Amino acid sequence: MIRAKTYPTIEGFKKYWWGKPLPYLYIILFCSLAVVQAIEFIAAAFLFLISEGGFTDVIITFLFLVLSVLLIIYNCRMPHRLFKNSQKLCSDVVETITFGDNSFVAENVGSKISERVENFYNTVTSAKNSDGWFIIVCERYRFYAFTESQITDGTADDLRNLLKSKLGKKFK
């Protein structure tokens, strides 16, 4: 059996969040929107100065520019918010993940939480091993992030081989 003992870290949340393509798409979208809004704002301000009209256009484009920038900041700060929310739930949680032949079990124990979750390999949507981290995502929002050094029983190579055999193309 392969076992890892871990706890939530901001680095793990960042690896999870930025490991998905969607946050990058959002940033590209909102940056594009911000550039367009900045151009519109400059044009509206220029027209306002020349014709002394269109003050409403200047205010509206400025508000959309501010909204675009806020959305970029919101998206970039998401891992920190996810981590902070998990810490509010239970700051001293220790997670032990035990990998078996048909499933892996995550036991979360802390002062405010004690749960045992069995995850079958067919519920894993993606998993990867990079930069010394294992990130395993199960069905939409449940994920497990831990470093290779946090594996207590077995080795990182053992876990890589197990995940390759159980997940196939889902493991990178």
Image (cartoon, grey):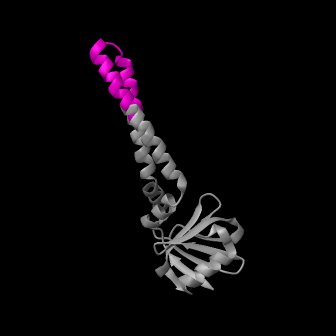
The residue sitting at 40% across, 37% down in the picture is: 34
Q: Which residue lies furthest to the left in this view?
A: 49
Work out whether 83 lies above or below 119: above
Quadrant of the image for the C terminus?
bottom right
Q: Quadrant of residue 136?
A: bottom right
Residue 122 falls left or right of residue 107: right
Q: In which quarter of the image is residue 104?
A: bottom right
Magenta stretch: dominant secondary structure = helix
Q: Nearer the viewer, residue 46 or 126?
A: 46
Q: Quadrant of residue 158?
A: bottom right
Work out whether 54 lies above or below 75: above
Asked whether the viewer can see residue 20, the reply is yes
Question: Per the image, is 68 magenta?
Answer: no
Q: Nearer the viewer, residue 131 or 153?
A: 131
* Residue 9 at x, y percent in the picture: 44, 67
* Region rendered in magenta: 39-65
Quadrant of the image for the N terminus?
bottom right
Work out whether 133 lies above or below 101: above
* Residue 110 at x, y percent in the picture: 51, 71
Residue 40 falls left or right of residue 112: left
Residue 118 falls left or right of residue 29: right
* Residue 78 at x, y percent in the picture: 46, 53
Asked whether the viewer can see residue 62, the reply is no
* Residue 125 at x, y percent in the picture: 65, 63
